[in-house]
Amino acid sequence: MVKYPSGSLAAFRKPIKKKENSTRRPYTHRKGVNFSDRGMTLEQQINESNKYYLTEGIAVVHKKPTPIQIVKVDYPKRSKAVIRKAYFRQASTTDYNGVYKGYYLDFEAKETRNKTNFPLKNFHEHQIFHLSACLKQKGICFTIIRFASLERYFVTPASFVINAWREKDKSSMTLKEIVDNSYEIKSGFRPTLPYLKAVDKFIADRER
């Protein structure tokens, strides 16, 4: 059940009177500490980055909606609706698609808490087929992989993921394999995750 709050309780709190002659020690960030991605999921980081790219006229990239068929809805109040039963209409493809510099982009976002490898079971067969089909149409396709425990981000070409997924008896991609076959990016601010820097390199490699 999803609720949409109409206001914040903070608006009804009584203001705290500041004591006279009281001083508060100013807070300063430690040097070399990046607070830009603290508490954010990979999806949130990408969504924030896409908003920045769109606002600045750099690229148009959106998260694909998940196709859901609503079966049963209850109306406990006239102003509220509660979805009681719903089904996925079909298997979704990848997470994001869009346009950048005249190129079609299609990519998936994945994260793991593993420190040495990324399990290939995180990719579904229909996603692999979809990425393969987009590559055949000259699209730029990739996966943004986040190693959450290490706070490392990689933009990995779809071709490498597809080949690894299809390799017999291979259950995961090692961190070293990903490092050797990807572009590593750093989280930051405006955009939160500058993945288009890696896309620029894909484009440059294609235009050579």
Image (spheres, rainbow, N blue to C red):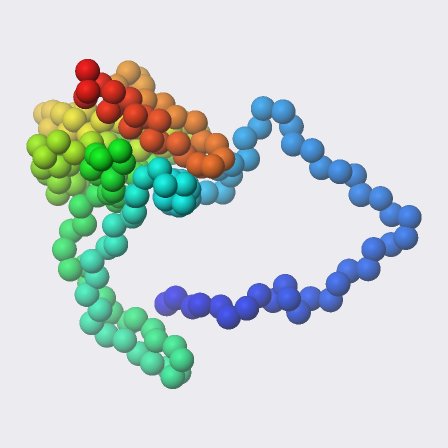
Question: In which quarter of the view is residue 199 placed?
Answer: top left
Q: Residue furthest bottom?
A: 78
Q: Nearer the viewer, residue 36 or 85?
A: 36
Q: Nearer the viewer, residue 113 or 38?
A: 38
Classify 108 as above or below 181.
below
Question: In which quarter of the view is residue 17 placed?
Answer: bottom right
Classify 92 as above or below 140.
below
Q: Position of residue 20 (x, y in %)?
A: 90, 53
Q: Nearer the viewer, residue 195 or 167?
A: 195
Q: Position of residue 188 (x, y in %)?
A: 48, 32
Quadrant assignment for the C terminus? top left
Seen in the image, is 9 located left or right of residue 168?
right
Q: Tell me which residue sits at (28%, 16%) in the image.
A: 180
Q: Position of residue 55 (x, y in %)?
A: 41, 45
Q: Tell me which residue sits at (39%, 83%) in the image.
A: 77
Seen in the image, is 125 located left or right of residue 13?
left
Seen in the image, is 190 located left or right of residue 204?
right
Q: Position of residue 200 (x, y in %)?
A: 30, 25
- Judge whether residue 174 can be spotted in this image: no
Quadrant assignment for the N terminus? bottom left
Question: In which quarter of the view is residue 33 placed?
Answer: top right
Q: Tell me which residue sits at (20%, 37%) in the image.
A: 104
Number of marks in picture: 0
Q: Residue furthest right?
A: 21
Q: Tell me which residue sits at (47%, 37%) in the image.
A: 190
- Judge whether residue 48 can be spotted in this image: yes
Classify 35 as above or below 198.
below
Seen in the image, is 11 located left or right of residue 4?
right
